[in-house]
Amino acid sequence: MRRAAATLPRLLARPIVFPRPRLISLPPLSPRSLPCLRLGSSLSLSSSPPPPPVDTVAPLPTSWDPPRPSSVSHAYADLEPYLGCSMPGKRLKVAVLLSGGVDSSVALRLLHAAGHDITAFYLKIWFQEDFENFWSECPWDEDLKYATIVCDQVDVQFEVVHLTDEYWKNVVSHIINEYRSGRTPNPDVLCNTRVKFGAFLEAIGSRGFDYVASGHYAHVIHSSSKDGLSILKLSKDMVKDQTYFLSHLSQSQLKKLLFPLGCITKEEVRSIASLMDLPNKDRKDSQGICFLGKVKFSEFVAKHIGEMEGIMLEAETGDYLGKHRGFWFYTIGQRQGLRLPGGPWYVVEKDVQNNVLFVSRNYFSLDKRRRIFRVGSLNWFSGSSPINVEQLQCKVRHGPGFYECSITSGSGISDEESLVVHLSEDDQGLAAGQFAAFYCNKVCVGSGVILDSWDEKCFPICSKALEISRMEDKSKLGKPVRIINLETSKTTICRSEH
């Protein structure tokens, strides 16, 4: 993991603190952390009004206000059953990452009820450069208003930390490079390891915090021994569990983390929010990639990678079906955005070198699923691979689903940093660049990145399709074929090649 930029301590030395009344003191600006001016403004470098001078104070926009609680005088005794993951009975100094959502807000209130000394932090990592036409309002303004009121309720200090540059260098640039290479990265895993619990953890290292807490659904069990290992355990809520996104943290990072929601369910979180009369008790959960905000993923990719027209071929027949915007807009198993009639159609393979998509209507046929794949960039919380490699469980994506699995070094693999994973069942949506997280008895033991190399059961592409894919002048293909609905089509499937 890369170290935080040298400028970060300087940024944190002048945090944005919300005094009463709520005002924002703007920090030094950088090319990648343009200020939001006010609701409804554009973010154009050429046409936007100049930002307020450094060190001036500007009030938050007042065109919208979240509902304010009528009272905060609730008995904390009502929260006692929910404090199992908040280390009650100890007086700890805790930095809480507050997003403005209900999960992190409830986490803060649980830690406050447990008697800890709390400081709340909002990480401004929105990537906004050159997206002046995509936002009608500052994407973090609403978050800040909710977070401010939550802190006001219990008189908790609230600071805003600008990490846009660190996010760009450690996460966004990596994501762009991965998409250019035809892989599908996971921004949430990278954000947790490199920014939220990476750059931020290092930046506050000198401020004496015992732990950093957030609203993640995960349960960290810390050793009573200073040299003992911390354990990342599944949360009580198996549906909301987020250990998958935390599986690539280091042991040193894990030792500094506290997740108060690990012992309760999402339903209980909502109940606590109502009990505490939090302003965001009915706010919807955030969706999508965190740094994009309200920007569509396709718009982000088009802006930073561009477009390059390519062709789509049917995997089984080699028929030329149409054109696409560039292979980096699509991932294996994707059906949205293909704009082909007679579907549903799915992306089954990509020829990155020739910018060709292979698509099929038979993506879920039983003979084309796979259960063997390789992982690299391995991370084990104990420092070494599990002893019992034959009785593990595996998640290949976020969600409650597990596979029984085993891991081996495999034959013909010279790289000791990669392993072969054997799933107990077939999976249709394995994508290179995603993470596979491994578990043993409800404990996450580590993870690895899914690699490009598959077993012999990769989706079969016929020889005609492969030949067309390698054509230098694809204009000779003429017009796309007329697609017939599956019910009436009688196609001849050509012999597949692996």
Image: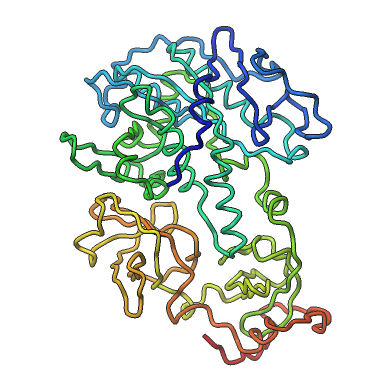
Q: Position of residue 282 (x, y in %)?
A: 53, 28
Q: Position of residue 291 (x, y in %)?
A: 59, 41
Residue sitting at x 48%, y 29%: 102
Please count the marks in the image.
Answer: 0
Q: How is the image coloured?
A: rainbow
Extreme-left residue of the structure = 225
Residue sitting at x 36%, y 58%: 378
Residue sitting at x 65%, y 84%: 465
- Up the image or down, 430 lies above or below 42; here it is below
Left/right of residue 384 with respect to residue 452 in the rendered view: left
Task: State the residue in front, 115 or 424.
Answer: 115
Residue 56: quarter of image: top right
Left/right of residue 40 with respect to residue 107 in the rendered view: right
Task: State the residue in front, 342 or 357.
Answer: 357
Q: Position of residue 219 (x, y in %)?
A: 30, 39
- Up the image or down, 174 lies above or below 116; here it is below
Q: Position of residue 368 (x, y in %)?
A: 49, 78
Extreme-front residue of the structure = 6
Residue 215: quarter of image: top left
- Up the image or down, 378 lies above or below 37; here it is below
Left/right of residue 202 with respect to residue 134 in the rendered view: left
